[in-house]
Image (tube, helix red, strand yellow):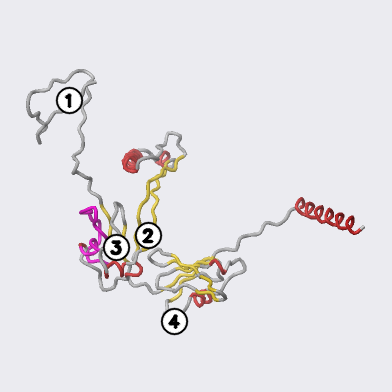
Amino acid sequence: AEVFTVNVDQNLKLIGEPFVLKPFDIISIRNSETYELQKQVFLEGEVLYPGPYTIRSKNERISDLITRAGGLTSSAYTDGASLKRPGPPKTISKDKNAISLDGDLERDKQLTMKRLMDLSEKDESVLAKDTIVIASDLVGINLSQILKVPGSNADLILQEGDIIRIPKQLQTVKVSGEVLNPNNIVYMSNRGFKSYIRGAGGYNINALPKGAYIKYANGSVAAASNFLFFRSYPKVMPGAEILVPQRPKRERLNAQAWIGIGTAFASLAAVIVSILR
Protein backbone atom coordinates (compact mmCIF):
# COMPACT_ATOMS: atom_id res chain seq x y z
CA ALA A 1 0.00 0.00 0.00
CA GLU A 2 1.10 3.52 -0.75
CA VAL A 3 0.48 6.56 1.45
CA PHE A 4 0.02 10.01 -0.07
CA THR A 5 -0.14 13.23 1.95
CA VAL A 6 -2.04 16.15 0.44
CA ASN A 7 -2.65 19.65 1.74
CA VAL A 8 -6.00 21.44 1.69
CA ASP A 9 -7.08 24.98 2.54
CA GLN A 10 -9.82 26.07 4.96
CA ASN A 11 -12.43 25.35 2.25
CA LEU A 12 -11.12 21.77 1.85
CA LYS A 13 -9.75 22.57 -1.62
CA LEU A 14 -6.51 20.88 -2.69
CA ILE A 15 -3.38 22.97 -2.64
CA GLY A 16 -1.22 22.13 -5.66
CA GLU A 17 -1.84 19.61 -8.39
CA PRO A 18 -5.13 17.65 -8.49
CA PHE A 19 -5.10 14.20 -6.91
CA VAL A 20 -7.17 11.47 -8.59
CA LEU A 21 -8.83 8.93 -6.30
CA LYS A 22 -8.98 5.26 -7.22
CA PRO A 23 -11.34 2.46 -6.08
CA PHE A 24 -10.75 1.24 -2.52
CA ASP A 25 -8.73 4.32 -1.54
CA ILE A 26 -9.01 5.22 2.14
CA ILE A 27 -9.05 8.91 3.08
CA SER A 28 -7.96 9.80 6.63
CA ILE A 29 -8.35 13.28 8.12
CA ARG A 30 -6.56 13.79 11.43
CA ASN A 31 -7.58 16.12 14.21
CA SER A 32 -5.69 19.33 14.69
CA GLU A 33 -2.96 18.93 17.31
CA THR A 34 -4.10 22.09 19.10
CA TYR A 35 -7.85 21.35 19.02
CA GLU A 36 -9.63 19.99 22.07
CA LEU A 37 -13.30 19.46 22.81
CA GLN A 38 -14.71 21.90 25.32
CA LYS A 39 -14.94 20.47 28.82
CA GLN A 40 -17.40 21.72 31.40
CA VAL A 41 -17.69 21.75 35.18
CA PHE A 42 -20.65 22.75 37.34
CA LEU A 43 -20.71 25.17 40.24
CA GLU A 44 -23.74 25.05 42.53
CA GLY A 45 -24.86 26.84 45.66
CA GLU A 46 -23.66 29.99 47.34
CA VAL A 47 -21.75 31.85 44.62
CA LEU A 48 -22.89 34.96 42.78
CA TYR A 49 -23.17 33.24 39.40
CA PRO A 50 -23.75 29.48 39.74
CA GLY A 51 -24.07 27.23 36.72
CA PRO A 52 -21.97 25.40 34.11
CA TYR A 53 -18.51 26.72 33.24
CA THR A 54 -16.16 25.73 30.44
CA ILE A 55 -12.63 24.87 31.54
CA ARG A 56 -10.33 27.52 30.05
CA SER A 57 -6.97 25.80 30.55
CA LYS A 58 -5.44 22.51 31.64
CA ASN A 59 -4.25 24.09 34.89
CA GLU A 60 -7.46 25.84 35.94
CA ARG A 61 -8.16 25.26 39.61
CA ILE A 62 -11.08 25.50 42.03
CA SER A 63 -10.03 28.97 43.19
CA ASP A 64 -10.01 30.20 39.57
CA LEU A 65 -13.55 28.91 39.11
CA ILE A 66 -14.80 30.63 42.28
CA THR A 67 -13.30 33.91 41.03
CA ARG A 68 -15.00 33.54 37.64
CA ALA A 69 -18.31 32.95 39.43
CA GLY A 70 -18.04 36.29 41.24
CA GLY A 71 -16.97 34.88 44.60
CA LEU A 72 -19.00 33.54 47.51
CA THR A 73 -22.21 34.95 48.91
CA SER A 74 -22.44 36.15 52.50
CA SER A 75 -24.31 33.00 53.56
CA ALA A 76 -21.82 30.50 52.08
CA TYR A 77 -20.57 27.72 54.36
CA THR A 78 -17.04 27.00 53.11
CA ASP A 79 -16.43 24.07 55.48
CA GLY A 80 -19.34 22.25 53.85
CA ALA A 81 -18.17 22.69 50.25
CA SER A 82 -17.80 19.42 48.36
CA LEU A 83 -16.46 18.19 45.04
CA LYS A 84 -18.17 15.38 43.18
CA ARG A 85 -15.91 13.89 40.52
CA PRO A 86 -17.39 11.45 37.97
CA GLY A 87 -15.73 8.13 37.28
CA PRO A 88 -15.87 5.95 34.16
CA PRO A 89 -19.38 5.01 32.97
CA LYS A 90 -20.64 1.45 33.29
CA THR A 91 -23.57 -0.37 31.72
CA ILE A 92 -25.78 -2.57 33.89
CA SER A 93 -27.95 -4.55 31.54
CA LYS A 94 -29.91 -7.75 31.16
CA ASP A 95 -29.63 -7.36 27.40
CA LYS A 96 -27.02 -9.74 25.96
CA ASN A 97 -26.34 -7.21 23.18
CA ALA A 98 -25.54 -4.38 25.61
CA ILE A 99 -22.37 -2.41 25.01
CA SER A 100 -19.41 -3.33 27.20
CA LEU A 101 -17.82 -0.12 28.44
CA ASP A 102 -14.31 -1.35 29.20
CA GLY A 103 -11.15 0.09 27.74
CA ASP A 104 -10.11 3.58 26.84
CA LEU A 105 -11.95 6.24 28.86
CA GLU A 106 -12.43 8.63 25.94
CA ARG A 107 -13.94 5.84 23.84
CA ASP A 108 -16.14 4.89 26.80
CA LYS A 109 -17.62 8.40 26.94
CA GLN A 110 -18.43 8.38 23.24
CA LEU A 111 -20.03 4.95 23.45
CA THR A 112 -22.04 6.02 26.48
CA MET A 113 -23.43 9.10 24.74
CA LYS A 114 -24.30 7.04 21.66
CA ARG A 115 -25.99 4.45 23.84
CA LEU A 116 -28.00 7.12 25.64
CA MET A 117 -29.18 8.56 22.33
CA ASP A 118 -30.16 5.10 21.12
CA LEU A 119 -31.99 4.35 24.36
CA SER A 120 -34.01 7.56 24.15
CA GLU A 121 -35.56 6.28 20.93
CA LYS A 122 -36.65 2.97 22.41
CA ASP A 123 -39.85 2.17 24.29
CA GLU A 124 -40.06 1.78 28.06
CA SER A 125 -39.92 -2.00 27.95
CA VAL A 126 -36.48 -1.85 26.37
CA LEU A 127 -35.31 0.99 28.60
CA ALA A 128 -36.01 -1.19 31.62
CA LYS A 129 -33.34 -3.61 30.40
CA ASP A 130 -30.56 -1.02 30.18
CA THR A 131 -29.24 1.20 32.93
CA ILE A 132 -26.17 3.33 32.35
CA VAL A 133 -24.51 4.33 35.59
CA ILE A 134 -21.76 6.92 35.83
CA ALA A 135 -20.00 6.30 39.11
CA SER A 136 -18.81 9.32 41.04
CA ASP A 137 -16.53 9.97 43.97
CA LEU A 138 -17.12 12.60 46.64
CA VAL A 139 -13.80 14.34 47.22
CA GLY A 140 -13.33 16.10 50.54
CA ILE A 141 -12.01 19.61 49.89
CA ASN A 142 -11.01 22.43 52.23
CA LEU A 143 -12.46 25.48 50.50
CA SER A 144 -11.33 27.84 53.25
CA GLN A 145 -7.72 26.75 52.72
CA ILE A 146 -8.14 26.88 48.94
CA LEU A 147 -9.32 30.49 48.99
CA LYS A 148 -6.68 31.44 51.54
CA VAL A 149 -3.78 29.94 49.54
CA PRO A 150 -4.77 29.70 45.84
CA GLY A 151 -2.62 27.35 43.79
CA SER A 152 -1.69 25.16 46.76
CA ASN A 153 -1.94 21.36 46.77
CA ALA A 154 -5.40 21.67 48.32
CA ASP A 155 -6.52 23.75 45.30
CA LEU A 156 -7.29 20.87 42.93
CA ILE A 157 -7.06 21.14 39.15
CA LEU A 158 -10.52 20.90 37.56
CA GLN A 159 -11.55 17.89 35.52
CA GLU A 160 -14.42 17.44 33.09
CA GLY A 161 -17.74 16.76 34.84
CA ASP A 162 -16.67 18.05 38.25
CA ILE A 163 -19.57 19.31 40.39
CA ILE A 164 -18.66 21.75 43.16
CA ARG A 165 -21.39 22.43 45.72
CA ILE A 166 -21.18 25.24 48.26
CA PRO A 167 -24.08 25.06 50.75
CA LYS A 168 -25.61 27.69 52.99
CA GLN A 169 -24.66 27.79 56.65
CA LEU A 170 -25.72 24.44 58.13
CA GLN A 171 -27.19 24.26 61.62
CA THR A 172 -27.86 20.60 62.37
CA VAL A 173 -26.01 17.34 62.97
CA LYS A 174 -27.53 14.06 61.79
CA VAL A 175 -27.21 10.92 63.92
CA SER A 176 -28.05 7.68 62.13
CA GLY A 177 -27.45 3.96 62.36
CA GLU A 178 -27.76 1.82 65.47
CA VAL A 179 -29.15 4.40 67.94
CA LEU A 180 -32.54 4.42 69.64
CA ASN A 181 -33.86 7.49 67.85
CA PRO A 182 -32.00 8.47 64.65
CA ASN A 183 -32.67 12.15 63.97
CA ASN A 184 -31.26 15.62 63.30
CA ILE A 185 -29.97 17.56 66.29
CA VAL A 186 -29.32 21.30 66.44
CA TYR A 187 -25.58 21.99 66.29
CA MET A 188 -24.02 23.48 69.40
CA SER A 189 -20.30 24.19 69.53
CA ASN A 190 -19.98 23.01 73.14
CA ARG A 191 -21.35 19.52 72.44
CA GLY A 192 -19.06 16.62 71.65
CA PHE A 193 -19.32 13.39 69.67
CA LYS A 194 -20.81 11.26 72.48
CA SER A 195 -23.18 14.05 73.47
CA TYR A 196 -24.89 13.92 70.08
CA ILE A 197 -25.23 10.14 70.34
CA ARG A 198 -26.88 10.56 73.73
CA GLY A 199 -29.16 13.14 72.11
CA ALA A 200 -30.35 10.40 69.77
CA GLY A 201 -31.21 8.09 72.68
CA GLY A 202 -27.84 6.36 72.92
CA TYR A 203 -26.72 3.07 71.39
CA ASN A 204 -29.21 0.26 70.85
CA ILE A 205 -28.48 -3.40 71.56
CA ASN A 206 -27.19 -4.02 68.02
CA ALA A 207 -24.71 -1.13 68.00
CA LEU A 208 -20.95 -1.40 67.59
CA PRO A 209 -19.82 1.70 69.57
CA LYS A 210 -16.14 1.29 68.68
CA GLY A 211 -17.00 1.53 64.99
CA ALA A 212 -18.87 4.85 65.20
CA TYR A 213 -17.55 7.53 62.83
CA ILE A 214 -18.45 10.97 61.48
CA LYS A 215 -18.95 12.10 57.90
CA TYR A 216 -18.49 15.82 57.34
CA ALA A 217 -20.50 17.95 54.93
CA ASN A 218 -17.58 18.15 52.49
CA GLY A 219 -17.41 14.35 52.19
CA SER A 220 -14.41 13.65 54.42
CA VAL A 221 -14.66 11.02 57.17
CA ALA A 222 -13.10 10.69 60.62
CA ALA A 223 -13.27 8.06 63.36
CA ALA A 224 -12.30 7.82 67.01
CA SER A 225 -8.69 6.96 67.82
CA ASN A 226 -6.97 5.34 70.80
CA PHE A 227 -3.83 6.49 72.60
CA LEU A 228 -2.72 4.31 75.49
CA PHE A 229 -5.78 4.19 77.79
CA PHE A 230 -7.46 7.23 76.28
CA ARG A 231 -10.00 7.38 73.44
CA SER A 232 -10.19 10.56 71.36
CA TYR A 233 -13.35 11.38 69.39
CA PRO A 234 -13.43 13.52 66.21
CA LYS A 235 -14.67 17.10 66.31
CA VAL A 236 -18.29 17.63 65.32
CA MET A 237 -19.05 20.32 62.73
CA PRO A 238 -22.33 21.74 61.36
CA GLY A 239 -23.85 19.56 58.64
CA ALA A 240 -21.96 16.45 59.73
CA GLU A 241 -23.50 12.99 60.09
CA ILE A 242 -22.58 10.60 62.90
CA LEU A 243 -23.02 6.97 61.89
CA VAL A 244 -23.12 4.03 64.27
CA PRO A 245 -22.62 0.66 62.52
CA GLN A 246 -24.28 -2.61 63.43
CA ARG A 247 -22.45 -5.19 65.47
CA PRO A 248 -21.52 -8.19 63.29
CA LYS A 249 -23.82 -11.11 63.88
CA ARG A 250 -22.16 -14.19 65.30
CA GLU A 251 -22.96 -17.44 63.59
CA ARG A 252 -24.43 -19.99 65.97
CA LEU A 253 -22.81 -23.40 66.06
CA ASN A 254 -24.92 -26.10 64.46
CA ALA A 255 -25.33 -29.65 65.66
CA GLN A 256 -22.38 -30.96 63.64
CA ALA A 257 -20.08 -28.33 65.15
CA TRP A 258 -21.12 -29.27 68.69
CA ILE A 259 -20.57 -32.94 67.88
CA GLY A 260 -17.10 -32.10 66.58
CA ILE A 261 -16.26 -30.13 69.74
CA GLY A 262 -17.55 -32.97 71.92
CA THR A 263 -15.50 -35.49 69.98
CA ALA A 264 -12.38 -33.34 70.38
CA PHE A 265 -12.86 -33.06 74.15
CA ALA A 266 -13.49 -36.79 74.42
CA SER A 267 -10.29 -37.54 72.50
CA LEU A 268 -8.35 -35.09 74.69
CA ALA A 269 -9.75 -36.69 77.84
CA ALA A 270 -8.79 -40.14 76.56
CA VAL A 271 -5.22 -38.98 75.90
CA ILE A 272 -4.92 -37.45 79.40
CA VAL A 273 -6.25 -40.65 81.04
CA SER A 274 -3.82 -42.79 79.09
CA ILE A 275 -0.92 -40.53 80.14
CA LEU A 276 -1.91 -40.67 83.82
CA ARG A 277 -2.02 -44.48 83.72
Which mark is nearer the camera, 4 or 2?
Answer: 2
Residue holding disc 4: 190
Is residue 65 shown in magenta?
yes
Q: Amino acid at mark 2?
A: Val
Q: Amino acid at mark 4?
A: Asn
| Res. 9 image quadrant | top left
Q: At label 1, which amino acid type do we have? A: Phe
3 or 4: tag closer to the N-terminus: 3
Task: Answer above or below: position of 193 versus 107.
Answer: below
Q: Position of residue 174 (x, y in %)?
A: 46, 70
Disc 4 to disc 2, C-alpha distance = 28 Å
Q: Which residues are magenta?
A: 46-67
The label shown at residue 155 is 3
Task: Assign a secondary structure to mark 4.
Answer: loop
Of the image marks 4 and 2, the number of the one nearer the N terminus: 2
Residue depicted at 47% across the width and 39% down the height: 94
Give the amino acid at mark 3: Asp
Cα–Cα gap, marks 2 and 1: 49 Å
Residue at which label 2 appears: 139
* Crowding at mark 1 (Cα within 10 Å: few <14, some 14-19, many 20+): few
Between disc 3 and disc 1, whose residue precedes?
1
Question: Where is 180 relative to 267, above or below?
Answer: below
Q: Residues within 10 Å of mark 4 (few under 14, many from 20)?
A: few
Foreground label between 2 and 1:
1
Q: Give the residue drawn at x 59%, y 70%.
A: 204
Q: CA distance from mark 3 to mark 2?
A: 12 Å
Counting residues from the N terminus, which is met first, the one under dot 1 or under dot 4?
Answer: 1
The numbered dot on residue 4 is 1
State the CA–CA distance, disc 3 to disc 4.
31 Å
Residue 148 falls in image quadrant: bottom left
Quadrant for the N terminus in the image: top left
